[in-house]
Image (cartoon, rainbow, N blue to C red):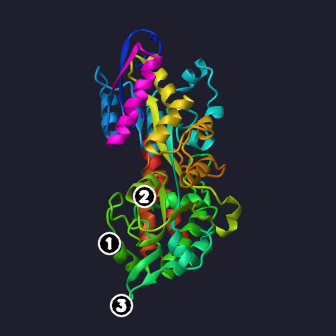
């Protein structure tokens, strides 16, 4: 996608105080989320009555990219995306405008406003083409009643503790099938993608030259070995996959944690709101995901991702568009109100510390994960999330026992990722 857009198309000479209509495209579609966006726009209009905002929701990245490549009067001025994996493409192609000049002109020091880990997934090779617009952090949900019956006093903090606790909490029926699984390690379950679980190792995906380094340092090998050992301890891949087919849809009333089929489960902060609404027949709590035994001091970290917002390169109203982006992403009261409305993690330091922020104990866990200095996100890449897809495919083969030599397989995976990146640059 590199080179497909013309960064000079847009103009930053417009008068932000003149009457104007901006087009804002976003991906939210659920009724409560759309209302939260509409309320945000209403608050913006109170501050900027000259700027009218026409919103379009439930828009995919593919649709946005097509519109930005085509340009014209119907293209959006302000864009948002749920897919941080694509930020490298947005920045390197020039389809999203560089925001550093706008930040400088507004006297905003981004490092003082946004947590560093969130800035990491909104820029690529020095170009800040997006800003964080709320975040998601991932941690553990656990069944307090099941823990109490098993005599377990706290959630596990290391991977070896997770394996022992998962085995202890697993219950079987008379015929040997699972009644309840302590933890489902399979990568295809709900939010269990390998990149999110691998975050607990604090991995480095690329070296300073941008080359894949998964085979170096031992983190990837240890992660995949740990996962395979857990699969074996809980009954084997075939039995686990068979049990997984009995689970309901992730967002339905038949979610496996909600129905008691899982005693521990990795999920995002939004799950707490859904559990409150569903009123499960057990007490539940939240905690950070465990970390490798040799990184016990990193406990509390987690995987972070989120929504990003930027300005279309083709917008003729970039200064006005900047006022909207700045309000949505950096106005403390706005960020807090939006976070409370859709139960996401705020994406500025001030909002995370705001007394107006909802702070029930379950949600506080995810706020702490977002603030943790060793939490991680996925690094942007020139080809978007293709390297993540490659990692997932490799992890699927590994857990199924189809990669007999992990070191050799990881070296091959590095070569594949490097070749994909080279093709994208060319």
Q: Nearer the viewer, residue 124 or 174?
A: 174
- Earlier in the chain: of badge 3 and badge 1, it is 3
Q: Which residue is mark 2?
A: 275
The residue positioned 60% from the left and 76% from the top of the image is 152
Q: Which corner quadrant of the image does residue 277 belong to?
A: bottom left
- Range of magenta residues: 26-54
Q: Is residue 153 at all visible to an observer of this figure? A: yes
Q: Which corner quadrant of the image does residue 105 belong to?
A: top right
Q: Considering the image in quadrants, where does the N terminus appear?
A: top left
Report whether 401 appears left or right of 406: left
Q: Which residue is mark 1?
A: 245
Q: How would you rate the neighbour count of disc 3 (Cα within 10 Å): few for under 14, some for 14-19, many for 20 or more? A: few
Q: Considering the image in quadrants, where does the C terminus appear?
A: top left
Rounded to the nearest angstrom, the CA distance separating label 1 from label 2 is 22 Å
Report x, y in % for residue 195: 50, 58
- Earlier in the chain: of badge 1 and badge 2, it is 1
Q: Nearer the viewer, residue 267 or 390?
A: 267
Report x, y in % for residue 233: 51, 81
Mark 3–mark 1 contact, CB under 8 Å? no
Mark 3–mark 2 contact, CB under 8 Å? no
Mark 1–mark 2 contact, CB under 8 Å? no
Q: Which residue is mark 3?
A: 175
Report x, y in % for residue 423: 42, 46
The residue positioned 62% from the left and 73% from the top of the image is 153
Report x, y in % for residue 206: 57, 51
Residue 343 inside the magenta-drawn segment? no
In the picture, the disc for residue 138 is none
Is residue 170 positioned above or below 4 on the image?
below
């Amino acid at each position: 996608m590199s080179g497909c857009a013309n960064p000079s198309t847009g103009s930053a000479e417009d008068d932000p105080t003149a009457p104007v209509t901006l087009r804002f495209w976003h991906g939210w579609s659920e009724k409560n989320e759309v209302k939260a966006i509409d309320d945000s726009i209403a608050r913006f209009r109170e501050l900027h009555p000259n700027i009218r905002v026409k919103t379009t929701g439930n828009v995919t990245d593919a649709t946005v990219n097509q519109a930005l490549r085509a340009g014209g009067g119907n293209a959006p001025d302000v864009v948002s995306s749920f897919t941080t994996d694509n930020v490298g493409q947005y920045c390197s192609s020039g389809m999203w405008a560089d925001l550093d000049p706008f930040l400088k002109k507004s006297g905003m020091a981004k490092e003082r406003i946004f947590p560093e880990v969130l800035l990491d997934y909104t820029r690529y090779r020095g170009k800040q083409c997006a800003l964080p617009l709320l975040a998601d952090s991932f941690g553990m949900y656990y069944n307090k009643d099941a823990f109490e019956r098993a005599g377990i006093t706290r959630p596990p903090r290391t991977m070896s503790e997770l394996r022992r606790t998962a085995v202890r909490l697993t219950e079987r029926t008379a015929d040997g099938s699972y009644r309840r699984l302590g933890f489902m390690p399979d990568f295809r379950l709900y939010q269990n993608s390998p990149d999110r679980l691998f975050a607990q190792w604090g991995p480095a995906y690329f070296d300073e030259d941008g080359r894949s380094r998964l085979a170096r340092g031992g983190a990837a090998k240890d992660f995949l070995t740990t996962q395979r050992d857990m699969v074996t301890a809980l009954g084997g891949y075939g039995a686990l996959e068979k049990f997984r087919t009995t689970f309901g849809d992730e967002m339905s009333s038949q979610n496996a944690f909600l129905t008691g089929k899982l005693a521990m489960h990795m999920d995002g902060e939004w799950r707490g709101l859904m559990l409150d609404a569903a009123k499960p027949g057990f007490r539940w709590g939240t905690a950070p995901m465990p970390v490798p035994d040799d990184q016990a001091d990193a406990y509390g970290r987690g995987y972070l991702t989120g929504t990003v917002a930027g300005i279309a390169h083709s917008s003729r109203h970039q200064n006005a568009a900047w006022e909207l982006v700045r309000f949505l992403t950096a106005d403390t009261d706005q960020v807090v109100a939006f976070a409370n409305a859709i139960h996401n993690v705020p994406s500025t330091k001030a909002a995370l510390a705001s007394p107006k922020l909802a702070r029930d104990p379950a949600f506080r866990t995810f706020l702490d994960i977002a603030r943790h200095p060793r939490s991680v996100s996925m690094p942007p890449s020139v080809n978007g999330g293709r390297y993540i897809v490659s990692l997932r495919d490799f992890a699927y083969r590994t857990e199924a026992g189809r990669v007999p030599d992990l070191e050799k397989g990881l070296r091959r995976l590095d070569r594949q990722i490097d070749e994909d990146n080279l093709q994208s640059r060319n």
